[in-house]
Image (tube, rainbow, N blue to C red):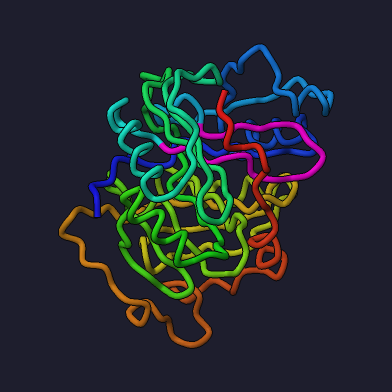
Amino acid sequence: MPACLIRGVRSIELVATNLDEATLFYETVWGLTPVEAPRSSSPRQARAGNLGPRYFRGTGGYHHVLGLHGGTQPAVVRIVFDVADRAGVDALHEGISAAGGKPGAPAKLTAAGGGYGFACKDPDGRNLAFVTACADHADTADQPDRPRKIVHVNLNTRDFDGTLRFFTQALGFRVIDDNAPLWFLHCANSDHCSIVLCKMNLPTLNHIAFEMPEFDSVMRGMGRMKDNGYPIEWGPGRHGPGNNVFAYFCGPDEVPLEYAADVLQVDDSYQPRPSAYWKFKPGRSDQWGITQPRSQRYYRVQRLFGFTADGDQLG
């Protein structure tokens, strides 16, 4: 298996049916900060009559962690991964091509944050992109109650064997733990996982996890969400794999979101554990045994969001 050249999830882009409502939510409730967007709109925005896209950063260095595009059908446009340098981007392009993928050619990017990179589809048809040399931020100090970054994205998969093989062999991720039907994939950072694959016979989004600076920020975030009409769908609790404190919600368009903190930090000495290791006592859904199972609503939306057909084209 090749060394992983991916340093984490840089950003995710979503289609929002009410761009103004979603913008207000992610800025004033979820805790992200708007960043300047490119002046021109994509063909999708022009058809929809929106001025988007709109972009938001966390307190970490990435230019943005979330992009919003206006549209009539909620969906994921793409997941963008961070790569250290151009040589890494080119090597990933070669590896994906050798694995039978059909990635676009690496190029200088004009979209928000700029940089150099390319996009492709995974075996389930999801849109992925790999970029480097973006216009990132120098100010990276934690701020209470504001997310740092996307710590992981959980993906439902239909072609499980093909998708797992793609992420581990073509992209270099390492299976760090499994807790069937979930497989946790580690890349070139210290976080327990950056991608989770869920064997669910659907090529959809399961959820997006945003890292908070500490436990109290998760708890206050739960209160802020409740105050603004977004009930807690699961949590608070502490997971097995990854050890993180969690709280789950449905955001605008019911997009499945997680606040996470205390994420387990690992290195090459970490020994993956099998599914049997992580099984809780009957009636428990976390380490503490205090939280109720996830809501039926959340169970539904964890299957709901597909990817757009054209998200493998980068600007």
Region of the chain picked out in magenta, as a range: 65-81
Residue at (83, 28) in percent of width and height: 48
**Would residue 122 be seen by someone viewing this image from the given angle?**
yes
Taking depth in this image into account, of 269 and 223 the one nearest to the observer is 269
Question: Which corner quadrant holds the N terminus?
Answer: bottom left
Q: Position of residue 99 (x, y in %)?
A: 39, 50
Answer left or right for 205 relative to 46: left
Taking depth in this image into account, of 218 and 71 the one nearest to the observer is 71
Residue at (82, 26) in percent of width and height: 47
Furthest residue in direction left, as rendered:
269
Is residue 71 inside the magenta stretch?
A: yes
Residue at (30, 30) in percent of width and height: 84
Quadrant hosting residue 27? top right
Indicate whether 121 appears above or below 48. Answer: below
Q: Position of residue 150 (x, y in %)?
A: 47, 42
Quadrant hosting residue 67? top right
**Would residue 146 be seen by someone viewing this image from the given angle?**
no
Indicate whether 289 appears above or below 141. Answer: below
Indicate whether 174 appears above or below 299. Answer: above
Q: Position of residue 123 (x, y in %)?
A: 51, 55
Q: Position of residue 222 (x, y in %)?
A: 59, 51
Quadrant hosting residue 62? top left
Q: Main secondary structure of the magenta part?
A: strand
Is residue 100 inside the magenta stretch?
A: no
Answer left or right for 155 relative to 294: left
